[in-house]
Image: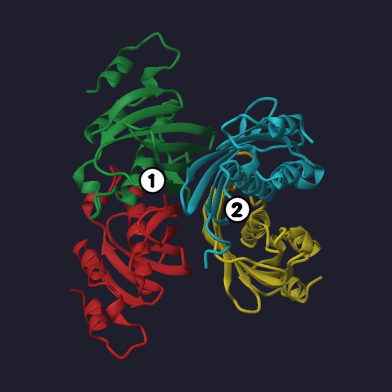
Chain colours: A red, B green, C cyan, D yellow
Amino acid sequence: MEEAAKRYLEKKENEFDIETVPRRLFEVLVSQGYHLHLIEPGRIICSLTVPTRLLKGDNSLHGGATATMVDLIGSAVLYTHGVPASGVSVEINISYLDSAYAGEIEVEAKTLLLGKAIGVVSVELRKKNTGKIIAHGRHSKYLVGSSKM
Amino acid sequence: MEEAAKRYLEKKENEFDIETVPRRLFEVLVSQGYHLHLIEPGRIICSLTVPTRLLKGDNSLHGGATATMVDLIGSAVLYTHGVPASGVSVEINISYLDSAYAGEIEVEAKTLLLGKAIGVVSVELRKKNTGKIIAHGRHSKYLVGSSKM
Amino acid sequence: MEEAAKRYLEKKENEFDIETVPRRLFEVLVSQGYHLHLIEPGRIICSLTVPTRLLKGDNSLHGGATATMVDLIGSAVLYTHGVPASGVSVEINISYLDSAYAGEIEVEAKTLLLGKAIGVVSVELRKKNTGKIIAHGRHSKYLVGSSKM
Amino acid sequence: MEEAAKRYLEKKENEFDIETVPRRLFEVLVSQGYHLHLIEPGRIICSLTVPTRLLKGDNSLHGGATATMVDLIGSAVLYTHGVPASGVSVEINISYLDSAYAGEIEVEAKTLLLGKAIGVVSVELRKKNTGKIIAHGRHSKYLVGSSKM
């Protein structure tokens, strides 16, 4: 497991109650190759070395892969508030700002709204070595129950 | 190769000049498991049996997989106009309307704008057996050159 | 009052129960200069002669005015389902496809999802004389109560 | 004219060349009631006392008014880079995070991308007294020429 995640899991006296963050969250991220750098209520910073299978013919990151990161890390950040479930997606939108190629990507997710029923997060992808923004996304979720139907 | 694609490739007298649609488009879609049902200028209908690897823990389709379809089929439809390249993404947005599980998904992409510099398409995902809409997306691309930088 | 709205208000035997559509809806639209052409469950078509105050310096329709139409007509269409309130906005997005100038604009709103908690509509703006699409928007609302907080 | 704008207009030795920011930008914002607090390349902070005409029946800020601010201030920030024109809108999207009522709103616009052809900005609306975020939007523009057709 990542050092950051381990330290985080060992921290006890914090007002940020670790018990409320499901261990499964860390497992999912780490199993998909993410390095966790910061986890606090409403904010996650992590990074990923772009795997070859996410690259298109011209070696740039597939737009769908970017959206998958916005979905995954944007959902993960909602768990840092101690909610039992991150809900179902209502809307995802992404502005593509620069091409990404093989290399390390830093992903920062922040909670914009955690309401009773609706959660909204922003997710920014950056090139880790230069800090240049690759994409900016927002993700809105319906938090209550498992269905918005 | 799909029957629809084959018939389409054999059609010669049509005002819709087949030579302008790169064969690679069909190859990419078919290699990823898509069945092509209709291709005409500004419109593609295809379907896909959801592969297990795109399902989440609760067996519903991953939101990132939906976004990947919007990216892929939304780009493909721009080629039906005979443009040499489908450009780079500016923005993708998706409303998630219903959960999709294992089964066949129909995807319809339509061109909303094909300008000199900007192309915009809508992409709708439906359950094939019921027609129920799973997701609605829009995809904006910058068509000129390979970079918007 | 508009002829279409009047006929609609007089229709009684229809399964579409008129009593469920608040009269205030018609009043608001008509008072803002909209002509109502079609109202049925999940769909409204109306038109508006662009007032001068919505034009920018170059005589094209202000992008904010387009968004206001998406908000207004997109909310109105939810009332056609007999819901007591159209809820609060979660997300609005708009693709701008062509410039609009003085003249008549047709607006068509359709319900994509009417769930227990979430409603999503699409709104298309067209030039009335040519049918050319000016803008395509989607509008997601949280239907329950008056607050998503 | 606003003090901030005046000071800004008088500053000469800065690498941020004031001559490249059209005076009309300040005039438009100030004439619409905006107070300018900060203008630097890629960033504008301003505020507005919500005028009554932008309120809905329940005294909350109209969603279309929020979109108009995203359009206006999002376009204005592109001028701070010295571009001759802020281009035409490709896409605007807005997440509505909290209701705003009568009172002062702070608007912060930041450039996410200023490419040769595409500009993308983020716009955040906050309650001035509490800093609480009301809405977050992104605005993509095509910068070259006056038409994306």
Q: Residue furthest front?
A: C13
Q: Residue at x 60, y 53 (%)?
A: C85
In terms of depth relative to the viewer, which is nearer, C63 or D24? C63
Residue D29, disc: none
Could you tell me which residue is drawn at 24 percent across and 83 percent down?
A7
Q: Is residue C87 above or below residue A83?
A: above
Q: Residue lying farthest top? A: B13
Q: Could you say where residue B107 lies in the image, as x and y percent from the top left?
A: 36, 34
* Chain on which label 2 sits: C
Using residue C20 as the reference point, say whether residue B78 is left or right of it. Answer: left
Name the image quarter holding residue D39: bottom right
Residue type at tag 2: Ala
Q: Residue at x 52, y 53 (%)?
A: D115
Which class describes the residues within 10 Å of circle 1: few (<14), some (14-19), or many (20+)?
many
**Mark 2 crowdedness (10 Å alpha carbons): few <14, some 14-19, many ≥20:** some
- Disc 2 marks which residue? C85
Residue A91 percent location from the top left of the image: 45, 52
Q: Is residue C13 above or below residue A14?
A: above
Task: Quickly name the residue at label 1.
Answer: B98
Label 1 resides on the chain identified as B
The quadrant of the picture occupied by the N terminus of chain B is top left
Q: Amino acid at mark 1?
A: Asp
Q: Is residue B102 left or right of residue B72?
A: left
Q: Position of residue B17 (x, y in %)?
A: 41, 17
Give C57 or A23, whichever is nearer the viewer: A23
Q: Is residue B112 above or below residue D68?
A: above
Q: Position of residue C15 (x, y in %)?
A: 56, 32
Looking at the image, how many numbered discs can be counted on the residues? 2
Alpha-carbon span between mark 2 and mark 1: 22 Å
User: Mark 1 and mark 2 in contact (Cβ < 8 Å)?
Assistant: no
Q: Is residue A136 visible?
A: no
